[in-house]
Image: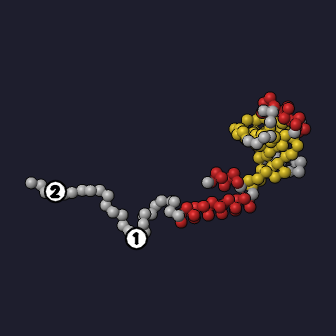
C-alpha cells in the first residue's frame, strides 16, 4: 500500500516550455519526427519519455529514462538508461511534482480500507467469538502407573 501512496503522490505538471534544472524528474511528449529519430533505439511507438534530466546542452536533452509510454497505451519500465533527445523532437515538457491533494486522498482511502478490514475481522489477532474462551483441542488421558 505504501508504494501506491508514493506513486499517487506525484503528478506531471506542464512547465510552459521552461526547462527544469538538472536532476529534476521530467517527462517529454515526443513528436512524430522524434518517433522516427528515436525509433531505432527506443521503438517506433513512443509517445512520452519519463526520467531524470541529466543535462541540456546544444539543444539536446540527456535523460536517464525510467519509463516509456506508448501511443496505443502501455508502458515500458526502464532502469535509468541514458538517452539523448533533441529539443525539436519534444512537443511538451512536464515536471514531476508532489501533489498534496492526491496524497491526502490516497491516505484517507488507505486508512478507510484498513478500518473496514479491521471492523470485518479480516485482520487476524482476536478470538473467533468474543467472550468465549477457546476450547482444548488436544485429547490427552492420564493413566495410572501399575
Identified at 62% across, 64% down, the residue is 112
Q: Is 4 on the left-hand or right-hand side of 34?
A: left
Asked if 24 appears above or below 105 in the picture, the reply is above
Query: Which quarter shows the C terminus?
Result: bottom left
Residue at mark 1? 131
Question: Residue 86 appears at what percent x and percent y?
Answer: 87, 36
The disc, 1 or 2, on the residue closer to the chain's N-terminal end is 1
Q: Residue furthest top?
A: 40
Q: Is 131 on the left-hand or right-hand side of 84?
A: left
Q: Secondary structure at mark 2?
A: loop
Question: Residue 145 appears at what percent x and percent y?
Answer: 12, 55
Q: Secondary structure at mark 1?
A: loop
Q: Residue furthest bottom?
A: 131
Residue at mark 2? 143
Question: Residue 59 appears at what percent x and percent y?
Answer: 89, 37
Total tally of numbered discs in the picture: 2
Tell me if residue 139 can be seen: yes
Question: Residue 17 appears at what percent x and percent y?
Answer: 89, 48
Mark 2 surroundings within 10 Å by alpha-carbon count, few (fewer than 14), some (14 through 19), many (20 or more): few
Q: Nearer the viewer, residue 66 or 128?
A: 128
Q: Which mark is residue 88?
A: none
**Picture quadrant of residue 46:** top right
Amino acid at each position: 500500500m505504501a508504494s501506491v501512496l508514493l506513486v499517487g503522490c506525484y503528478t506531471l505538471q506542464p512547465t510552459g516550455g521552461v526547462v527544469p534544472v538538472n536532476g529534476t524528474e521530467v517527462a517529454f511528449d515526443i513528436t512524430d519526427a522524434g518517433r522516427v529519430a528515436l525509433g531505432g533505439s527506443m521503438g517506433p511507438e513512443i509517445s512520452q519519455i519519463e526520467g531524470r534530466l541529466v543535462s541540456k546542452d546544444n539543444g539536446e536533452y540527456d535523460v536517464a529514462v525510467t519509463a516509456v509510454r506508448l501511443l496505443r497505451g502501455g508502458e515500458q519500465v526502464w532502469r535509468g538508461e541514458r538517452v539523448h533527445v533533441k529539443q525539436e523532437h519534444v512537443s511538451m515538457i512536464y515536471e514531476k511534482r508532489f501533489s498534496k491533494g492526491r496524497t491526502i486522498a490516497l491516505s484517507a482511502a488507505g486508512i478507510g480500507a484498513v478500518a473496514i478490514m479491521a471492523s470485518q475481522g479480516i485482520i487476524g489477532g482476536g478470538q473467533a467469538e468474543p467472550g468465549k474462551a477457546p476450547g482444548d483441542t488436544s485429547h490427552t488421558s492420564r493413566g495410572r502407573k501399575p
